[in-house]
Image: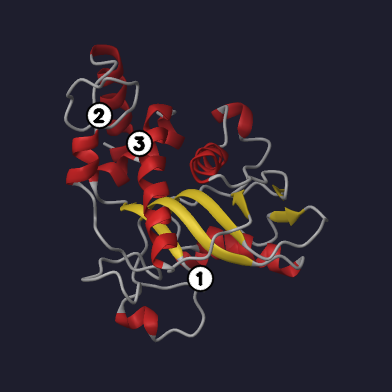
């Protein structure tokens, strides 16, 4: 059975039988959030490389050896590896509408970003840009998950969000199951930047980064219109060993 379908059934069963319990440990929650503080703490991945999101033995210099050797790179900040329990649940926001997961996961990412600011490892962006959704998909899903995440992070970090800066003008195939090269081809010409004053420090926001193809395509579209993209933010990372620029 498809793992995502199995997860969806499990989450729906938990909603019916345990409407206010942690989706990992099933302990009661005092608030309507999907994960408890204990589970979030237990699965904290520690310091992660800002290039490939792999584990680091120490925060400084914020990148692993192979990523330090790369001349071109852009900081990628994530809260959890996708294959950790909280990271895997990130997909339930988009696929199953589990919006109760937004507060705890966005809290974790906002805290990681704040810590990196305090260390001087990350510039503070001027604006958050969520990955846009094609208009034809919005009625089916009812929301753009990347916009919900960007709004939550914007509130926590006192940063403005610009969902109108970029439009997705061509409907693409589902990226799931595609290789890195196929993902890049799938995204050619799908983003259109709305004319306006150029911004130098943009942070792009999505739920999960797998190969970085979506972030890279969106950043390229913005750069062609004079904008500067300084970093990428995602709740979880499932990146392969292949790096992206």
Which residue sits at x=44%, y=50%?
176
Q: Quadrant of residue 3?
A: top left
Q: Sort mark 2 into few (<14), some (14-19) or many (20+) by Cα contacts within 10 Å.
A: many
Mark toward the viewer: 1 or 2: 1
Q: Nearer the viewer, residue 243 or 223?
A: 223
Q: Which residue is mark 2?
A: 23
In-image side of 130 versus 66 (left or right): right
Residue at point 71% right, 65% down? 227
- The single residue placed furthest to the top in the displayed view is 17
Q: Earlier in the sequence, mark 3 or mark 1?
A: 1
- Residue depicted at 18% across the width and 25% down the height: 26
Secondary-structure class at tag 3:
helix
Q: Quadrant of residue 13?
A: top left
Up-down relation of residue 75 to residue 1 (above or below) = below
The residue tagged 3 is 104
State the residue position of label 1.
74
Residue 22 is at least partly visible in this image? yes
C-alpha span from label 1 to label 2? 33 Å
Q: Earlier in the sequence, mark 3 or mark 2?
A: 2
The image shows residue 8 at horizontal and vertical percentages of: 33, 29
* Vertical relation: 243 (above or below) 182: below
């Amino acid at each position: 059975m498809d793992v995502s379908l199995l997860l969806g059934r499990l989450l729906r069963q938990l909603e019916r039988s345990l409407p206010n319990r942690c989706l990992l440990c099933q302990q009661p929650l005092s608030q309507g959030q999907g994960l408890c503080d204990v589970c979030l703490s237990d699965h904290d991945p520690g310091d992660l490389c800002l290039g490939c999101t792999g584990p680091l033995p120490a925060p400084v210099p914020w990148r692993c050896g192979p990523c330090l050797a790369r001349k071109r790179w852009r900081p990628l900040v994530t809260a959890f590896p996708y294959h950790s329990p909280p990271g895997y649940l990130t997909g339930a926001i988009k696929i199953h509408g589990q919006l109760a997961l937004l507060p705890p996961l966005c809290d974790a990412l906002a805290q990681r970003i704040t810590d990196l600011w305090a260390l001087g490892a990350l510039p503070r962006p001027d604006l958050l840009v969520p990955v846009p959704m094609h208009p034809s998909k919005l009625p089916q899903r009812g929301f753009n998950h990347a916009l919900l995440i960007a709004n939550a992070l914007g509130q926590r970090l006192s940063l403005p969000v610009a969902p109108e800066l970029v439009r997705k003008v061509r409907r693409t195939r589902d990226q799931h199951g595609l290789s890195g090269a196929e993902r890049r081809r799938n995204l050619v010409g799908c983003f259109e930047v709305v004319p306006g004053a150029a911004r130098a420090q943009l942070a792009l926001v999505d739920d999960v980064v797998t190969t970085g193809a979506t972030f890279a395509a969106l950043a390229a579209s913005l750069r062609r219109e004079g904008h500067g993209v300084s970093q990428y933010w995602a709740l979880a990372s499932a990146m392969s060993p292949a790096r992206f620029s």
